[in-house]
Image (cartoon, grey):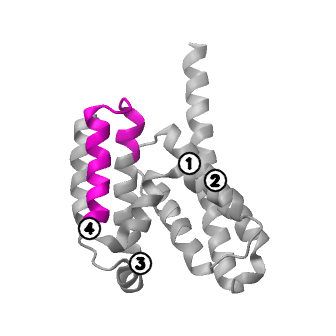
């Protein structure tokens, strides 16, 4: 996919995502639709920023599109920050491992990452590596805070994380196997 096509898709999904209304209300009304829209925006945003030169016109366009989401719908600001500040999120996850967690704020990002992998139309190794790292960090947080969750919620989140990590592992193994077969010829 070209960067221009990815920017068009990003704009389309960003417009849809902006129209969800209040984020909390949208999640309670139709969580799957909300997470699907978030995952699509995140997917195309990451594709553009990971495959274009930093500070290039395309890179700035992607950042502008994402920034407009939070400007046009302030209730989505927290979700936009998840997309634009993965390094900060990684630091926060590491520093919060030993503190009790709010179960409602951890389930949304986990479900979003799971949905993104399940609905991914292309496999961007760098982006998948970031998702894999985040899921592993959330998994550790869940394990260390198991008593904070209702048993069925905890088990459901762990099952989703494990299934997604297994999917990532299988796909990476398949890619590595194909790469090795290509080198043998």
Lower position in the chain sequence, tag 2 or tag 3: 3
Check contact, mark 1 vs mark 2: CB within 8 A: yes
Earlier sequence position, callout 4 versus callout 1: 4
Is 68 inside the magenta-drawn segment? Answer: yes
Marks 1 and 2, how far apart in space?
6 Å
Which stretch appears magenta?
46-71
Q: Which residue is mark 3?
A: 31
Q: Quadrant of residue 25?
A: bottom left
Picture quarter containing residue 97?
bottom right
Disc 1: which residue:
87
- Labels 1, 3: front one: 1
Looking at the rendered structure, the secondary structure element under dot 4 is: helix
Q: Residue at x 37, y 81 (%)?
A: 30
- State which quarter of the image contains the N terminus: top left
Residue with the mark numbered 4: 18
Of residue 6 and residue 86, the one placed in the foreground of this image is: 86
Q: Secondary structure of the magenta portion, mostly?
A: helix
Asked if marks 3 and 4 touch (Cβ < 8 Å), the reply is no
Q: Is residue 162 among what the camera can see?
A: no
- The numbered mark, 1 or 3, whose residue comes first in the sequence reads 3
Q: How many angstroms separate mark 4 from mark 1 (CA)?
A: 24 Å
Camera-side mark, 3 or 4: 4
Residue 28 found in image quarter: bottom left
């Amino acid at each position: 996919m070209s960067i221009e096509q990815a920017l068009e898709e990003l704009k389309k999904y960003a417009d849809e995502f902006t129209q969800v209304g209040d984020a909390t209300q949208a999640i309670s009304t139709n969580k799957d639709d909300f997470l699907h829209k978030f995952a699509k925006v995140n997917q195309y945003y990451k594709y553009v920023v990971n495959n274009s030169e930093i500070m290039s016109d395309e890179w700035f366009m992607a950042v502008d599109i994402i920034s407009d989401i939070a400007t046009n719908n302030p209730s989505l600001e927290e979700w936009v920050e998840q997309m634009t500040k993965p390094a900060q999120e990684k630091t926060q996850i590491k520093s919060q491992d030993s503190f009790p967690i709010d179960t409602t704020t951890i389930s949304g990002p986990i479900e979003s990452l799971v949905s993104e992998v399940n609905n991914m139309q292309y496999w961007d190794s760098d982006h998948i590596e970031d998702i894999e790292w985040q899921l592993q960090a959330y998994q550790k947080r869940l394990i260390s805070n198991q008593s904070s969750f209702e048993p069925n919620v905890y088990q459901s989140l762990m099952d989703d994380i494990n299934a997604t990590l297994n999917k990532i592992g299988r796909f990476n193994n398949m890619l590595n196997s194909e790469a090795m077969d290509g080198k043998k010829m």
